[in-house]
Amino acid sequence: MERLEKLKLLLNQSSEAHDSYLELLLELVADQAMIYIGKLGRPEPAGLESVILTIAAEYVRQNQLAGAEGAVKSVSRGDTSISYNTADLSAASMGDFVSLYGHLLRPFMRVKMR
């Protein structure tokens, strides 16, 4: 099963409307995870895919993008003010988010002997 299909299964999503977004998200999470463990440019370690899927699924859930693109973040009634949740999908924000899952990524880190 392909990584995108696994993520969509985790999110309980069957629509293809967000596939390009989810592909980009998976790519960013994988790159940031490899940077975090110090193995960027090398083959992905066995078992890392499940951690990448976990991080990506949690990112989507926290940003309410699984099925409600542009989900309402807050509503004010006096003079009508509605603000929408806009996820910041950048490498810097993704790196910060990935670092929250350091406890899952540490077993994959390269050990440096002195």
Image (cartoon, rainbow, N blue to C red):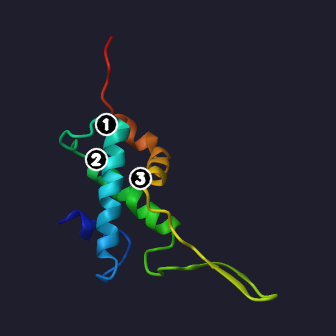
Q: Residue at x 45, y 61 (%)?
A: 58
Element marked by disc 1: helix
Q: 15 or 84, which lies in front?
A: 84
Question: How much space separates mark 2 and mark 1, taking CA atoms?
Answer: 8 Å
In screen coordinates, is 42 left or right of 74?
left
Q: Quadrant of residue 40?
A: top left
Q: Is residue 88 above or below residue 46?
A: below
- Mark 1 crowd level (few <14, some 14–19, many ≥20, 10 Å Cα): some
Element marked by disc 2: helix
Element marked by disc 3: helix
Q: In which quadrant will I find the N terminus?
A: bottom left
Asked if the residue at tag 2 contacts the one at tag 3, i.e. Cβ–Cβ closer than 8 Å, the answer is: no
Amino acid identity at mark 3: Ala
Asked if the residue at tag 1 contacts the one at tag 2, i.e. Cβ–Cβ closer than 8 Å, the answer is: yes
Q: Residue at x 19, y 65 (%)?
A: 2
- Mark 3 crowd level (few <14, some 14–19, many ≥20, 10 Å Cα): some
Amino acid identity at mark 2: Leu
Amino acid identity at mark 1: Phe
Question: How much space separates mark 3 and mark 2, taking CA atoms?
Answer: 19 Å
Name which of mark 3 and mark 1 comes first in the sequence.
3
- The mark found on residue 48 in the picture is 2
Question: How much space separates mark 3 and mark 1, taking CA atoms?
Answer: 21 Å
Q: 100 or 41, which lies in front?
A: 41
Q: Residue furthest right?
A: 78
- The mark found on residue 91 in the picture is 3
Q: Nearer the viewer, mark 3 or mark 2?
A: 3
**Residue occupied by mark 1:** 108
Q: Is residue 34 above or below residue 56?
A: above
Name which of mark 3 and mark 2 comes first in the sequence.
2
Q: Residue at x 52, y 65 (%)?
A: 62
